[in-house]
Amino acid sequence: YTSWNQIEPVRTWANPTSKQQALAYLDWAEYSADFYRRVFLKYKSYMPGITVPYVINPNAVYGYYDYLSDLSGVEHWLSRINPELMGGAGAVHGYTNWVGTPAYENTPYARYVFTATRYRGPNLEDNWAYSKNDPLNNNERYKFTTPSYFASMLFTAFGATGINVYTAVSTDNWTSELDSANTPPHPPDAPIAPDGTYRNKYWTAQQLGLFFADEGKYLVRAEFRQSKIAWGIYPPYAWADAWNTDPAKWRNAGFY
């Protein structure tokens, strides 16, 4: 093929019985990342002359279950998130978290490490405030400082180029039209309260800011690829598993 337009999109898994039939699934999975690139370029074209960085912040690696052995979301994530491809289009790579509490759980810890080591960039939404009124991270532990501080330092240790305290301030200007399931303030446990007073988290966040002010330029330039152990990923395998993780299905298609 010379163009994505020549490929008929597949919509459901139909148990291919040959490699030729299976290629359609790999092609469509690969197209997922290119689709993001196309959408980005379209939006970028609406803002000609803008000189500030165009930053994207995809979610961290996700999964469908809570135990560590399930990192099935990795394949889906790898099929869609391609920092090299997006960088070629002029985007600056960043990411979020929202996958749990790495200070207490192994699976979120693994997802943080995978996300941070895939490609360096800033964590643009490091949870310092949401303990109950966020459906993706409904965790009472975030009432306290330790989970947020641990997550920030974990991302930093694995190569983050910046940390955004999200959010630093709570607001009480929050109506049921915005969130009917919770009551103000929003978010409930930010370092600074709606009236401007400091909560206990503030002092740790302040110290973290002072640390990055002194050391940030060195951390950004630091070499984080010195380990002799690395992820070895063959992209077509990720594209395949994004459709079906059962080896028997792929043997039926002529692989292995």
Image (cartoon, rainbow, N blue to C red):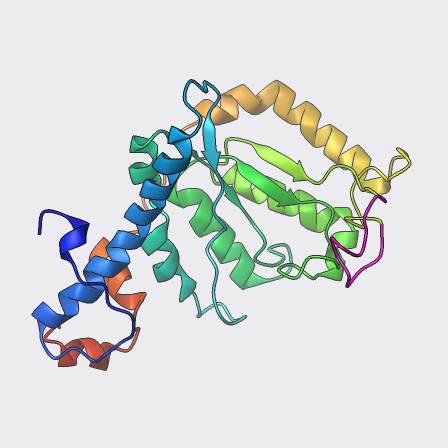
**Which residue is pictured at 24% across the width and 60% down the height?**
28
Where 182 falls versus 126 (above or below)? Answer: below
- Which residue is at the front of the view, 82 or 230? 82
Where 126 falls versus 142 (above or below)? Answer: above
Whether residue 233 appears in this view of the structure is no
Whether residue 23 sits left or right of residue 199 in the image: it is left
- Which residue is at the front of the view, 178 or 207? 178
Q: Is residue 121 magenta?
A: no
Magenta region's main secondary structure? loop
Where 104 falls versus 185 (above or below)? Answer: below
Whether residue 72 sits left or right of residue 52 in the image: it is left
Whether residue 96 sits left or right of residue 121 in the image: it is right
Q: Start and end of the magenta stretch?
A: 172-184
**Which residue is pictured at 62% across the width and 19% down the height?**
214
Toward the front, the furthest residue is: 46
**In which quarter of the view is residue 140 placed?**
bottom right
Whether residue 251 appears in this view of the structure is yes
- Which percent across, then down, holds residue 163? 59, 35
Whether residue 252 sits left or right of residue 203 in the image: it is left
Instruction: State how many labels appear.
Output: 0
Quadrant placement of the C terminus: bottom left
